[in-house]
Image: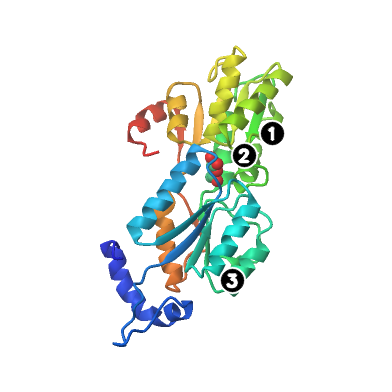
Amino acid sequence: MRTHSASWRAAAVVASVLLVGSIAACGNSDTGSDGGTKDDGKITMGFSQVGAESGWRTANTISIKESATAAGVELKFDDAQQKQENQIKAIRNYIQQKVDVIAFSPVVESGWDTVLKEAKDAKIPVILTDRSVDSADKTLYKTFLGSDFVKEGRLAGEWLVEQKKTASGPVNIVELQGSTGAAPANDRKKGFAEAIAANPNLKVIASQTGDFTRAGGKQVMEQFLKANPKIDVLFAHNDDMGLGALEAITAAGKVPGKDITIITVDAVKDGMQALADGKFNFIAECSPLLGPQLMDLAKKVHAGETVPARIETEETTFTSAQAKEALPNRKY
Ligand code: GYE
């Protein structure tokens, strides 16, 4: 299969010279009777995805699948339905199938050492995408490609501090956390808390997981509204939970974006539309378009090249006016 871009083809020429030994070691090369190699140079990647919990995840999955095709990478894809045990099973399958590279977006941060060690022993490089793990042994994976979630939480909090700088009394905040134990949930909570500590009037009065889904966001927001007569601000760890919460807020007779200031993370299309419509007030962007960089990294680690241990995604923030301007050109 030869669907590589020109730049990849050029890189492949160099890489193939360096790589004859390591490709043979992977067991996917075969020497033909003419002494040439039958290996078509195609990389096989086993990818274990978190699930299909949000608009972000859908865009991320599309990005990975499209980029694999464009890069000529053979992709084996598994949806773990937000369960760590399913991811561990998928990774073990990929090890058994002797794929060239394993990539995955870990559902939660902890509990990966054993399976990562198995991949390392099998000499299959692992790339973390989107979310990281808390393993102390950094040699268990080659690199982590993804966002700085603490920064996203901080940007959300800093915007709120600025908005409420003249507030004379308490500002009651409720927080919809992402999936329990997930890096973006832990980190966004941390960054937000750090930023709002600048103003003692800003208080998180309730904080609970909505599992990164619309249904979760709606259900938990209903509980928040029942239990707390005065809610001034909602910080949702992603757009989908914020979108679910909109229904609960409207049903409670309140006007989202006015009675309750709403801040979210992601900036997927539906979130950006809500922001442009004035129902959300601020979004810290988190880009799901990780596919092209991931395929590039896979080729590099397969070629035995050293890659940076951490590659951060570039991101921005949006106010309502900025969302209106950006929406027509949004890809997801
Ligand atoms: O923000 C959320 C998704 O890990 C960055 O997971 C990702 C998060 C994203 O479900 O919408």
**Colour scheme employed for the rendering of this structure:** rainbow
Is 243 drawn above or below residue 181 in the view shown? above
Whether label 2 lies within 8 Å of ligand 1 gets the answer: yes
As drawn, the label of residue 178 is: 2
Q: Are marks 1 and 2 in contact (CB under 8 Å)?
A: no
**Where in the figure is residue 241, as x and y percent of width and height?**
57, 31
Is residue 274 in view from this perspective? yes
Is 16 drawn above or below residue 143 in the view shown? below
- Residue in view at x 53 percent, y 27 percent: 243
Q: Earlier in the sequence, mark 1 or mark 2?
A: 2
**Where in the figure is residue 182, as x and y percent of width and height?**
63, 47
Q: Residue furthest right?
A: 227
Per the image, the residue denoted by label 1 is 208
Give the CA separation, mark 1 to mark 2: 8 Å
Identify which amino acid the numbered label 3 is placed on. Lys
Q: Residue furthest top?
A: 253
Give the CA separation, mark 1 to mark 3: 36 Å
Q: Nearer the viewer, residue 90 or 247?
A: 90
Whether label 1 lies within 8 Å of ligand 1 gets the answer: no
Q: Are marks 1 and 3 in contact (CB under 8 Å)?
A: no
As drawn, the label of residue 120 is: 3
Is 37 drawn above or below residue 101 in the view shown? below
Give the CA separation, mark 2 to mark 3: 30 Å
Q: Is residue 252 left or right of residue 38?
A: right
Q: Is residue 254 left or right of residue 228?
A: left
Crowding at dot 3, Cα within 10 Å, few <14 / some 14-19 / many 20+, comes out as some
